[in-house]
Image: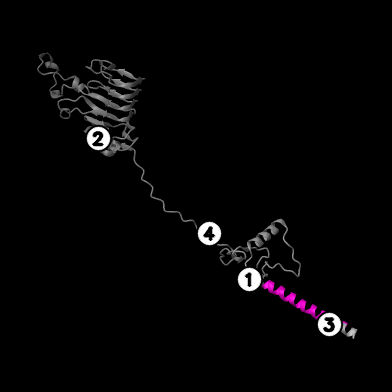
Amino acid sequence: MRLGIKGLTFLLLLVLLVLCSNVSVSDARTGKHWRQKKVPSTSLMRRKVKGKNGNSQKQYSKGNQNPYQPTPSTSPNAPVSPSESPVQGRGYQGPSPTMPPPSSGSGHTLPSPPLLLPPQPPAAPIQNTVFNVIDFGARGDGVTDDTQAFEAAWAAACKVEASTVVVPSELEFVVGPISFSGPYCKPNILFQLDGTILAQTSTRVWGSGLLQWLEFTKLTGIAIQGSGVINGRGQEWWTYSNPNDDDDDEEYNVGLEKMPQMKPTALRFYGSSNVSVTGITIVNSSQCHLKFDSCQGVMVHNLTISSPENSPNTDGIHLQNSKEVSIHHTNLACGKSLIKLN
């Protein structure tokens, strides 16, 4: 009877062991499935990151798989790295897909398309800064009146800063009274004189008389330079005498009867600054050859002035109400004063 009770007791224990074993296995499986559906908490993710960086992550045996590690995919098209980490709030995310470079079909990568630049505006036309009097109709034959051509060339140059008016060499230009004037001209104009300018001798153009022949007025940065000549042809005035004077009857020239008593200065600058006269020659002015009136910053050098010794009132240079004037290396030979200060 005891043996029967012992055997029955042993049998009951064996049954209990079997039942306990089945319950443990079922709980483990149930926990596994529950963990896969639950989003990992912040604390679990932090512990995992810390374990990965500090080599303190719990090691799982072959029979105990990490419940937070996704099951490797068996598809060859979507490999999943076992080291990928879940993202908080979004569950596990695999590596971002990488687009392969475009291929031409022959194993070579297609070149990148050229970078399209915005269209550039058309280049501004180059502004002409040289104005030759020949291009404006001057003949330069020593006979034709070229006054209008000189005026037109100056009007064009006046609109352009640092422009140049060219009087070409080996030509003689007959010019009447003319004023190269501002004050609306651009600064720093160069008058390049290499030819010869002849004064007009027609009594019609002088009227009752003028004080100047060539005048540059109210300009800033005006320069006259070159190897040319300004010829005032003053002998047309010097030989003039009053026909009412009996003592001069033999010297009176009927052809010059109407020449005015008032004689013009050959070259005059008025109300201008930074004036330069270099290299040119002024000859036979009817009166004064070169005059600066109310100018500031005047430079005169390598200048030649010449007229006959007996020519009346043919001063070389007049300075009137002007300041900061420098005159050097000049050759002056005229009928009266070489340099006169007023």
For the residues labelled 4 and 2, say whether their Cβ atoms are less than 8 Å apart: no
* Cα distance in 3D space between marks 2 and 3: 138 Å
Mark 2 or mark 1: whose residue is earlier in sequence? 1
Q: Amino acid at mark 3?
A: Leu
In this rendered view, identify the residue nearer to me: 4 or 321: 4
What segment carries the magenta color?
Answer: 6-33
Mark 4 or mark 2: whose residue is earlier in sequence? 4
**Residue 78 horizontal/vertical position (percent):** 63, 69
Which residue is tagged 2?
Answer: 151
* Cα distance in 3D space between marks 3 and 4: 81 Å
Using the image, determine if residue 129 lies above or below residue 342. below
Secondary structure of residue under mark 3:
helix
Residue found 24% across the figure and 22% down from its top: 285
Which residue is tagged 4?
Answer: 112
Q: Is residue 38 left or right of residue 321?
A: right
In this rendered view, identify the residue nearer to me: 98 or 200: 98
Residue found 87% across the figure and 83% down from its top: 5
Q: Which disc number belongs to residue 37? A: 1
**Residue 110 horizontal/vertical position (percent):** 55, 62
Q: Residues within 10 Å of mark 3 (few under 14, many from 20)?
A: few
For the residues labelled 4 and 1, say whether their Cβ atoms are less than 8 Å apart: no
Residue 38 seen: yes
Mark 3 or mark 1: whose residue is earlier in sequence? 3
For the residues labelled 3 and 4, say whether their Cβ atoms are less than 8 Å apart: no
* Cα distance in 3D space between marks 4 and 2: 61 Å
Q: Which disc number belongs to residue 11? A: 3
Marks 2, 3: nearer the viewer: 3
Q: Residues within 10 Å of mark 4 (few under 14, many from 20)?
A: few
